Image (cartoon, coloured by chain):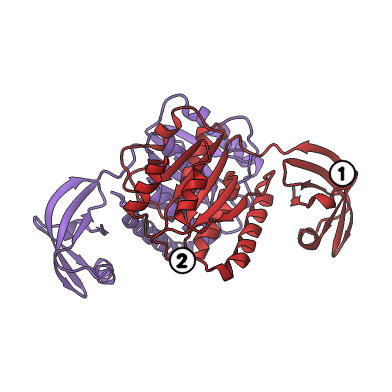
Chain colours: A red, B purple
Amino acid sequence: MPKFFVPAEAIQANEIVLTAQNAAHANVLRLRPGEEVIACDGCGTDYRCTVSTVQADRVCLTVREAVPSCSEPCVRASIYMAYAKADKLEHVIQKATELGAYEIVAFPSDRCVSRPDDKSLAKKLERWQKIAASAAEQSGRGTVPQVVTLSSFRAAVARALQAELAVNFYENEHARTFSAALADGLPHTVSLMTGPEGGYTEAEVAYAAAQGMQTCTLGRRILRCETAPLCALSALMYACGEF
Amino acid sequence: MPKFFVPAEAIQANEIVLTAQNAAHANVLRLRPGEEVIACDGCGTDYRCTVSTVQADRVCLTVREAVPSCSEPCVRASIYMAYAKADKLEHVIQKATELGAYEIVAFPSDRCVSRPDDKSLAKKLERWQKIAASAAEQSGRGTVPQVVTLSSFRAAVARALQAELAVNFYENEHARTFSAALADGLPHTVSLMTGPEGGYTEAEVAYAAAQGMQTCTLGRRILRCETAPLCALSALMYACGEF
């Protein structure tokens, strides 16, 4: 069933009006009066609706019932990904949203080959947030993950440590496993941090560990920078009983 | 350290000669005499070597020692993926190889929007196998996963059932989890099957279940056809103690 995220002001007692991109999307889907759709406030409530009228720039929905979104995972997973080439970061934003990430945080690190300048960042952030919104709709999420950018590796470590469990995945860590890090009881909030194309410097890994992050392996194979966060997130969701 | 898969005939007692694409790749990497590389027979043995001479079409390596590849997972995971648009299948071949898949099997199903004809299949299979080989080298695998194509969904189900555990992931399955399927003891061989862009038909899911495959969920979010197999594979590797 098609799903649309709508701003709070679009939600009236018994009616929701799709405008702008939502209306355009509804027209692309060739929605007709009588069809069923879901409108979601992006804050955990799904509105089950019936299409009442369709115009090019305005699609009216009649609300049948409001129900809590049931598709949000029980664990809040924050993906911390060092800046990578644009298509890789966008790939991770889309896939991490599908897989249930709470937020995606991008940050620079020493060996990043790509880092946006301040001038282009606002525009890129807008684009990244749209990718997250679109993936959230397609996968039936109850919220849209926020995409956040930070200005330094140290800021990323400090923010990641606010979660109950903060893990830094490093290809030269061979002993400590992610399952060992989860063995002390499943956390409600987790930060999963991965490095750039060129890998972390040893100094970065040492700094994150000294601050309190756990350094873990993702197995004996070298994962690409866009594969590692999605592998870790999939494993976390599995470990937390999501599937 | 750079890794090259070499044919058996290239491996002499104390010398390995890189030719053709391997030699070209060594030149792209600007390897110089004295540098260390790994040559792998693709059957589980790594040869630790030192570069002795470099020419455009011929790079000679001196073998220092032969050691068993330690990067192969303990579980043999076969990925069964319904044909998807070319870029999605290629994406899964690359990523599943990184994540430790034993083989990738592509098959047609009712709602596949894309299925190659016999004429183009041989050429595509060659391309897909190259993608697997390249990903195996980059991720440090000890073997190159085979890419296999089958001509029908029924053939895929029959082949998948040869594994100790054969799971079919279906977005309309909400009760049976993958962890429940793994709860009876970790298998040595597993088939992980996922559907096409448009999803399976109910008849297909019923057929696979009647033949003996377990129908499982991958969580309450709808995953794209290229996300689902990699999510399942990541979870399996985690469950089997790989990380």
Cα–Cα span, label 2 and label 1:
46 Å
Decide: is B136 above or below B27: above
Label 1 chain ID: A
Judge by depth and name the residue closer to the eye, A203 or B196: A203
Q: Which residue is mark 1?
A: A63
Label 2 chain ID: A
Q: Residue furthest left?
A: B13
Q: Kindly indicate the quadrant of the structure image that contains residue B135.
A: bottom left
Amino acid marked by disc 1? Val
Can the viewer see residue B149 in this picture?
no
Q: Which residue is mark 2?
A: A114
Judge by depth and name the residue closer to the eye, A228 or A155: A155
Q: Which residue is at a point 48% across and 60% down the rendered structure image?
A: A83
What is the crowding at mark 1: few (fewer than 14 residues within 10 Å), some, or many (at least 20)? many
Judge by depth and name the residue closer to the eye, A124 or A96: A124
On the rendered structure, is A172 left or right of B182?
A: left
Judge by depth and name the residue closer to the eye, A1 or B115: A1
Decide: is B157 above or below B119: above
* Between discs 2 and 1, the one toward the N terminus: 1
Coordinates of residue B169 in the picture (x, y in percent): 56, 39
Amino acid marked by disc 2? Ser
Q: Quadrant of the C terminus of chain A?
A: top right
The answer to whether mark 2 and mark 1 are in CB contact below 8 A is no
